[in-house]
Amino acid sequence: MKKMKRLFATGCLLMLSITSLSLLTGCSDDDGPKLPSRSITKVDLYKSNNGSYEIASRYEFSYDVKKRISNVRISDKNQEVTYTYDTNKIEYRWDGVNEDNTTFTKRFESSLTTGRVNIGNLTSTGNFTYFYTPQGYISEAAIGADMRLVYKWGNSSVFIESDPVTYETEYNYTIIDNTYSIDLNVLTQMADNRKDFTLVMNSYGQLAGVLGTRYPYFLEDSDYIYKYSFDENNRLVQIEQTPATTKPDKQDAYWYRITYQN
């Protein structure tokens, strides 16, 4: 009789263990709520025109299985940037239409050292050579033998100037986090209307995260005032950028609308 009781008790414990395991399996991560994606799939850039905003360009982003950026489609002038990754190498091809309606193709290729570019080549422009601070931020970028960008990282801002002085911008530090699938600081470069600014800054290289360490926060152009909007998941969904200067080339206002994977 005692043996039967022991067998019955053992059976009950086994059934209880199986039931508990089933409950735990039923509450797996697959069935739980998914975390909100921070993968940006689209940015609509609007530009002011006589007091109202009109869409200037749409950027659509695709990623590979390793969550690296693989393609950018830009509605403005039918541009497209396609990335190719290899072991310690990166290449992107940039296609679009010039002002005179002729097509262009620019190809940037480089080997990577510890995940970043030291020397890269951009067709029709020449070599880009990069130097970095001990923290990994860009300190200098030389575009062939004709231009050099110098990055001066201060206590509250970073000042970027070119030699010869053609491009000059100061960015202020903020507490808006920059932990999304793309580097948000490329957005202001894309909106900058100075001729070939995106090319000079190698913005699409920065977008792939191969030009030094990404700054962890959003940087504000000191010639503008910014206003931010977030969704219920604390994701940045809108940026309003309005002039705070009388500089002729900094008089346009911009509005960014950001779309996520979910």
Image: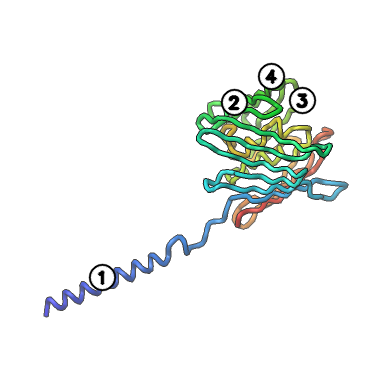
Q: In this view, does 54 lie to the left or right of 117?
A: right
> Which residue ends up furthest to the top in the rendered image?
145
| Sequence order check, earlier mark of 2 and 4 | 2
Q: Mark 2 points at which residue?
A: 119
| Sequence order check, earlier mark of 1 and 2 | 1
In the drawing, what numbered circle is on residue 166?
A: 3
Q: Is mark 3 on a helix, strand or loop?
A: loop
Q: Distance between the residues labelled 4 and 3?
A: 15 Å
Q: Is residue 175 above or below residue 18?
A: above
Q: In which quarter of the image is residue 137?
A: top right
Instruction: Give x and y (percent) for residue 230.
Output: 65, 53
Q: Quadrant of the C terminus?
A: bottom right
Say which of marks 4 and 3 sits in front: 4
Say which of marks 1 and 4 sits in front: 4
Instruction: Give x and y (percent) for residue 45.
Output: 74, 47
Q: Quadrant of residue 74?
A: top right
In the drawing, what numbered circle is on residue 145?
A: 4
Q: Are marks 1 and 4 in contact (CB under 8 Å)?
A: no
